[in-house]
Image: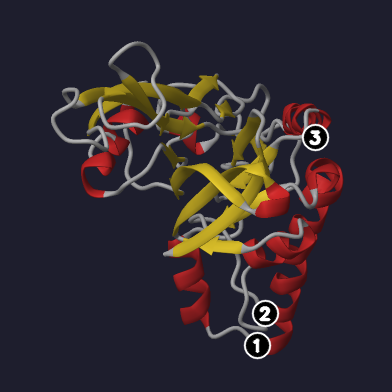
Amino acid sequence: MELVTYDLPWKPATIMPVGDIQWFGDDHEVALEKLRAHIAWGVERGAWFIGMGDYIDAFSPSNRQRLKSAGLYDNANRVLDEAARNLVKELYERALKPSAGRWLGLLAGHHYAELRDGTTTDQMLAGLLKTRHLGDCAYVRLRFRRDPAHRTTSGAVLIWAHHGQGAGKSIAAPVQKLESMPATFEGDIFLMGHQSKIVAAPMDRCFPTWPRLDGVQPPRIYHKTVLLVGTGSFMRGYVEGRREGLTPAGTYVEKGMMRPVSLGAPVITVTPRVKEVARESDSRPKPHRKGQYREHSSVWLPDLRVSL
């Protein structure tokens, strides 16, 4: 599991998870134009992106296993390598290039190619986008600072991200899969791809605070919102006039009589926010009013919003 930290200025930050593109060179089956517009929209607004896996459609885990057992000659493997690299370059050039340098990291998915130099196409894409490869699961910490010059930390938002596993027919399937994660992992935003559904649900968690001076004022309960987010897809499930060679044939979605999904990806807005708390005390040197003194402290309560 990878753990990374990014320092951000004290202002709202736009976070855009993007994955499940599965580009294999066909504009009819992948909504590349929609992806290109989505990336451009984010770049224009200074967004930060997170890669959720399955960027190209080469190859699934079973495909990779079969290729390993096929005993192909070196030249055949070299041809496959070049084809996979070209898919990554094409996806980068046609849709993702404007966002280079704006990625918090790229997760591994299920669909990628293992290259002959020991790396993967996911790692290759991370290099092109000037970011790091996050492996299968990652914590991404966004640290918001009031005063960068003095490196004063005011609060952090913790993102737990995984490409995802399993299948689900219901619209809420990704949320149901993620619902148990906050019981096991600390976090503010939980992201999962794989199931191709754009869905989100807020979940409140309660935490107590106590005044610094015992017995002056009762403890307080605050509510902190946690977001559970399914990160969508750019794969078209039903394509008119699709062919396999000369034979009319649907995608695996059509063959499986699966429900079509809404294409695209969510947009998350994180606004740093500190709630100032004033507590009564009788032991402070400067009076607030006759016979009473006031103790000031703050509680970190970031505002988390998601648009689908």
Q: From the image, which quarter does the C terminus lie in?
A: top right
Q: Which marked residue is nearer to the observer: mark 3 or mark 2?
A: 3
For this orientation, the residue located farthest to the top is 290
Q: Quadrant of residue 10?
A: top right
Secondary structure at badge 1 equals loop
Q: Examine the rendering and report whether any part of residue 109 can be seen.
A: yes
Label 1, on which residue?
73
Q: Residues within 10 Å of mark 2 (few under 14, many from 20)?
A: some
Point 66% across, 21% down: residue: 240
Label 3, on which residue?
43
Circle 2: residue type? Asn
- The vertical placement of 54 against 132, above or below, is above
Query: Whole-percent x and y of residue 52?
Result: 54, 46
Front in this rendered view, residue 60 or 37: 37
| Residues marked 1 and 2 touching at CB (< 8 Å) | yes
- The vertical placement of 125 against 279, above or below, is below
Label 2, on which residue?
77
Q: Is residue 238 left or right of residue 33?
A: left
Q: CA distance from mark 1 to mark 2?
A: 6 Å
Q: CA distance from mark 3 to mark 2?
A: 37 Å
Circle nearer the N terminus (1, 3): 3
Point 49% across, 22% down: residue: 260
Secondary structure at badge 2 equals helix
- The vertical placement of 290 against 137, above or below, is above
Query: Whole-percent x and y of residue 4?
Result: 54, 59
Point 73% across, 80% down: residue: 78
